[in-house]
Image (cartoon, grey):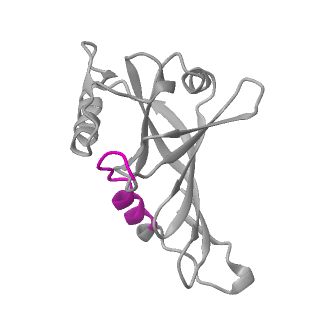
Amino acid sequence: MDTHNISNLYDLPPLEWDAARTQLRDATAQGGGGPDRWTWWVTTVNADGSPHTNPVGALWHDDAVWFVTGPHTRRGHNLDRDTRVTAAFSAPELDLVVEGRAERVTDPAQVAALVKVYNDQGWPCTTDESGIGLDAPFMAASAGKAPWFLYRVAATSAHAVSTVEPGGATRWTF
C-alpha cells in the first residue's frame, strides 16, 4: 500500500488506513432507518462516459464495499458494461471515497454470508432459488423488482479527509 499525504498545506500527518477501516466498519453497521442511518453514494459510468451517482445501502465488510442493485437499473446496466466505480461515505470522523471495480458475486456461499450480515443489520433479505439473487419485503424504489444482485468492490485506491481536529487528508493506493 502506498500512502500519500495530501495535507501538505497545513503540515499535518497522514491519516492511518487502519483507523479509516475501523470508522467504515463501525459506521456502516446500520440498524435500520432514521437519524442513525448512514448512506453510501455509488458512482458508475454511463455509456457516454458521464457519472451516474445514487445513494445505496452499502456495507464495509471484509475490507470491501458491498452493495445490491437490480439488473434492470441504470447502475446495473452500467456495471454490465464498465465495472469502474467510486463509493463515497461520510463517517463520524472522516469523509472517504473508495475507488475500484465492482464484481458481481456469483458464489452462493458468499452471497449467503452477506445476506446474514444484512439480516444482522436490520435488512431482512433472503436468497432466491438460484442462491445468488436477493429478495426482501422492502427495497429502494429505484432498485426495480427482485431479484437483486450483490456486488463487491475491492479498493484499488481510497482517499479521506478528516472531519475532526487536527484534520488531515490522505490518499492510499493498494
Question: Residue lying farthest front?
Answer: 34
Q: Nearer the viewer, residue 141 or 152?
A: 141
Q: Locate residue 48, reporting x and y percent.
A: 78, 25
Q: Locate residue 40, reporting x and y percent.
A: 50, 47
* Picture layout, residue 98 above or below residue 53: below
Q: Is residue 143 left or right of residue 12?
A: left
Residue 81 falls in which quadrant of the image?
A: top right
- Residue drawn at (47%, 62%) of the image: 91
Magenta span includes 129: no
Residue range in magenta is 20-34
* Picture layout, residue 9 above or below residue 160: below
Task: Count the marks.
Answer: 0
Q: Nearer the viewer, residue 37 or 112?
A: 37
* Picture layout, residue 16 above or below residue 45: below
Q: Is residue 39 left or right of residue 106?
A: right
Q: Nearer the viewer, residue 140 or 147?
A: 140
Q: Is residue 128 left or right of residue 11?
A: left
Q: Nearer the viewer, residue 137 or 58?
A: 137
Q: Locate residue 125, reporting x and y percent.
A: 27, 29
- Residue drawn at (43%, 41%) of the image: 57
Q: Locate residue 146, reporting x and y percent.
A: 38, 17
- Residue drawn at (28%, 39%) of the image: 118
